[in-house]
């Protein structure tokens, strides 16, 4: 059991029979005497992917989810689904199309991820903060490119389209932030 004082970003709790990861926590002090401190949370249901809000009173208790994190590896895409392997037990898991479509633009065969297992089945995969991908298509280098914030579109080897600086060429490897799909640097 967790109390609201244990809440922190990334903690997995069980709400309505589903594992939920806390995304944001705001503690609101009472404005009147005798009022309870409120703990406002934003969380993601790991079974449905929904992002919801819930307010708890200070001291409320919630159940701990039967949730484990394991080192894993992306093996291959099977139709719209992704197949992952637990690197400790070598057990394979399939990820449903809804969740896989969100992370597939950042995955190459062999990419290491963190698998989230709830009651023995895979419910999510956490990507590394950055991945290295190859630019397969982009307009030619712009001559006399200045230090202004000009960008051009590039298509990466996974099909992901991002904005990159004008000096990048086709065939170069770049680092991409998996949280928001931003160009970080050359690899």
Image: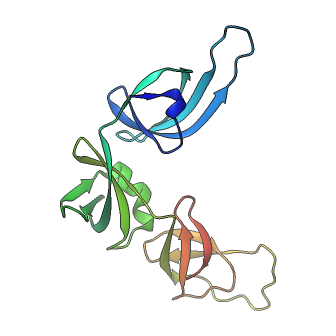
In percent of width and height, residue 157 lies at: 44, 77
Q: Nearer the viewer, residue 94 or 24?
A: 24
Question: Does 149 sit above or below residue 60?
Answer: below
- Judged from this view, the residue extending furthest toward the top is 34
User: Is any atom of residue 53 visible in this view?
Assistant: no
User: Is any atom of residue 184 visible in this view?
Assistant: yes
Counting labels gives: 0
Question: Does 54 sit above or below residue 117?
Answer: above
Name the residue: 66% across, 11% down.
35
**Residue 119 found in image quarter:** top left
Name the residue: 32% across, 73% down.
110
Q: Would residue 136 appear left or right of 84 to someone viewing this image? A: right
Q: Would residue 124 appear left or right of 154 to someone viewing this image? A: left
Quarter of the figure with the N terminus: top left
Quarter of the figure with the C terminus: bottom right
In percent of width and height, residue 135 lies at: 52, 81
Name the residue: 67% across, 89% down.
141
In percent of width and height, residue 151 lies at: 70, 74
Name the residue: 52% across, 35% down.
7
């Amino acid at each position: 059991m967790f109390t609201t004082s244990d809440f922190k970003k990334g903690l997995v709790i069980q709400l309505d029979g589903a594992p939920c990861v806390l995304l944001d926590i705001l503690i609101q002090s009472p404005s009147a005497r005798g009022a309870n401190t409120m703990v406002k949370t934003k969380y993601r249901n790991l079974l449905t992917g929904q992002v919801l809000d819930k307010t708890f009173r200070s001291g409320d208790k919630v159940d701990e989810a039967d949730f484990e994190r394991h080192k894993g590896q992306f093996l291959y895409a099977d139709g719209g689904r992704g197949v992952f392997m637990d690197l400790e037990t070598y057990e394979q898991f399939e990820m449903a199309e809804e969740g896989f479509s969100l992370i597939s633009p950042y995955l190459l065969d062999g990419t290491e991820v963190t698998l989230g297992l709830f009651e023995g089945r895979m419910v999510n995969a956490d990507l590394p903060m950055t991945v290295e991908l190859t630019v397969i298509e982009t307009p030619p280098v712009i001559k006399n490119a200045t230090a202004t914030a000009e960008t051009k579109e590039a298509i990466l080897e996974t099909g992901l389209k991002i904005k990159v600086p004008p000096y990048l060429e086709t065939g170069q490897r770049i680092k991409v932030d998996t949280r928001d799909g931003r160009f970080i640097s050359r690899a």
